[in-house]
């Protein structure tokens, strides 16, 4: 019988979708207060893979990814997702009850995979607790990240993979 083992710490990442750089700066400051210094920020990437957020957040959206110096335990992901949901709500446009001005997607990178948190259930997601699910969006094999049939189209893009590979390299050095 296999014994339960303590998993290795992992690299926290947060992807932000936003229209205003000012909101991103404020959100980053709050994230750094909570999770410590950022050690990687991706270039600004136009978020034009889907119109999913257009009605709620407007046109001309941008995506950036951050990773944080301090490693986390994998089982912290549910609490982190709930925190980013609260932060999104605090930055929502007050005059429009549910209109977000920023979308924050937490996850983590390990040697073998990129895991994302979600509050939406689906057949490929595992329940973590507190209303939060996780999915393995990408896996690392033969020197690069690979994707699954359910991987979001933007997470398959060369610009995202380049950022995730850079973050994974920082993690490996840690």
Image (cartoon, rainbow, N blue to C red):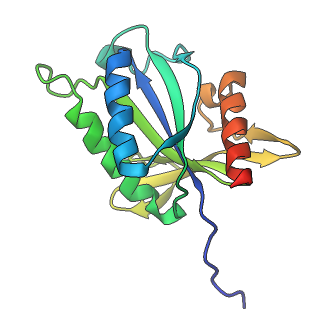
Which quadrant holds the C terminus? Answer: bottom right
User: Can residue 105 be seen from the camera position used here?
Assistant: yes
Residue 145 x, y percent position in the rendering: 76, 40
**Would residue 6 be found to the left or right of residue 19 on screen?**
right
Q: Is residue 30 above or below residue 132?
A: above
Q: Quadrant of residue 168?
A: top right
Name the residue located 47 percent from the left edge and 44 percent from the top edge. 37
Residue at x 26%, y 43% (from the top left corner) = 86
Q: Tell me where residue 167 sits by quadrant.
A: top right
Dividing the picture into quadrants, the one containing residue 143 is top right
Q: Residue furthest left?
A: 95
Residue 49 place in picture, x, y as percent: 56, 17
Q: From the image, which quarter does the N terminus lie in?
A: bottom right
Looking at the image, residue 14 lies above or below residue 1? above
Could you tell me which residue is drawn at 43 percent across and 14 percent down? 61
Image position of 133 (left or right of 69) = left
Relative to 25, 165 lies left or right: right
**Vertical placement of 92 versus 113: above or below?**
above
Which x, y percent locates residue 121?
Answer: 44, 49
């Amino acid at each position: 019988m296999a014994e339960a083992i303590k998993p290795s710490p992992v690299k926290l990442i947060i992807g932000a979708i936003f229209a205003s750089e000012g909101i991103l700066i404020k959100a980053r400051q709050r994230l750094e207060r909570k999770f410590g210094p950022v050690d990687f920020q991706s270039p600004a990437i136009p978020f034009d893979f889907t119109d999913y957020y257009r009605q709620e957040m407007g046109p001309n959206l941008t995506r950036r990814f951050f990773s944080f110096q301090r490693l986390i335990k994998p089982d912290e992901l549910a609490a982190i997702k709930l925190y980013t949901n609260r932060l999104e709500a605090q930055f929502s446009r007050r005059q429009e009850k549910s209109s977000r001005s920023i979308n924050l997607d937490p996850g983590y990178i390990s040697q073998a995979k990129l895991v994302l948190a979600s509050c939406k259930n689906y057949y490929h997601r595992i329940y973590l607790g507190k209303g939060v699910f996780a999915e393995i969006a990408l896996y690392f094999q033969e020197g690069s990240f690979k994707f699954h049939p359910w991987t979001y189209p933007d997470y398959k893009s060369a610009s995202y993979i380049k950022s995730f590979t850079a973050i994974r390299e920082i993690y490996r050095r840690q």
